[in-house]
Amino acid sequence: MSTYFLTGARIGIRPFESSDIGPRYLAWLNDPDVNRYSGRRFRPSSLLAAERYLASIGNDAEILAVCLLDSGTHIGNIKYGPIDWFNGCAEVEILLGDKSQWGKGYAREAIQLITRHLFITLGLHRIEGKTANPAFAAAVKGLGWSLEGVLRDRFRGEDGYLDYQLYSLLANEFKESRPSERKRRK
């Protein structure tokens, strides 16, 4: 296992490795609740499909493991890219596969860590994410991202079509949370 290259108050982020693909991970990829807002929800995932996906990630994109700092437990992934270097922007996506960790603010913390990395370390100008998932929307809104637009009825959900929302944050809008702010959110 690699060491974390980003750490927050409760999570660490490290490169996702082929050794992360096992029965627990494949269970996430095949869980209808975990994939309710994912395009892959209608396709069963196998070990081979997961390995192929990992191999297909290009040079201008990263898939990373989100882990609990206290135990090292892998609870999900966060992905950014592909990076448009000319325009200084990238898309962010997250999968919190471990349902026992939902609702604890880990996705928000992971998105904040990646946001900092993309703006401060990589020098990007803009990051964005599109979603039909209300949990993702709540996380990024809480981090100051702006709703830019709505793609009406863009996503077929269980009970009909859902709107896809496009959120973004610009480098000059990025504000790091302070430890006192983290304590208030708990």
Image: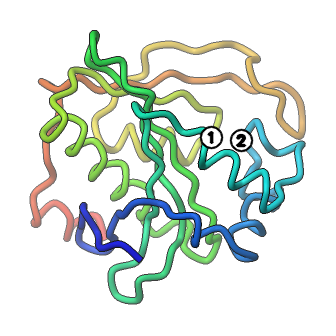
Element on which disc 2 rests: loop
Q: Considering only vertical position in the picture, is 53 above or below 169?
A: below
Q: Which residue is mark 1?
A: 133
Rendered-image quadrant of the C terminus: bottom left
- Alpha-carbon distance for marks 2 and 1? 6 Å
Rendered-image quadrant of the N terminus: bottom left
Residue at 60% x, 46% y is 55
Q: Is residue 105 left or right of residue 176?
A: right
Q: Considering only vertical position in the picture, is 41 above or below 10?
A: above
Residue at 49% x, 34% y is 58
Q: Which residue is mark 2?
A: 37
Q: Considering only vertical position in the picture, is 169 above or below 12?
A: above
* Residue 17: % across, % down: 51, 64
The quadrant in which residue 10 appears is: bottom left
Residue at 89% x, 52% y is 44
Circle count: 2
Q: Is residue 85 left or right of residue 183?
A: right
- Looking at the rendered structure, the kind of residue marked 1 is Asn
| Closer to the camera in the image, 100 or 94 | 94
Element on which disc 1 rests: loop
Whether tag 2 and tag 1 are in contact, CB under 8 A, the answer is yes
Residue at 88% x, 45% y is 43
Q: Earlier in the sequence, mark 2 or mark 1?
A: 2
Q: Is residue 35 left or right of residue 126?
A: right
**Circle 2 Cα neighbour tier, 10 Å, few/some/many (<14 / 14–19 / ≥20):** some
Q: Considering only vertical position in the picture, is 32 above or below 41?
A: below
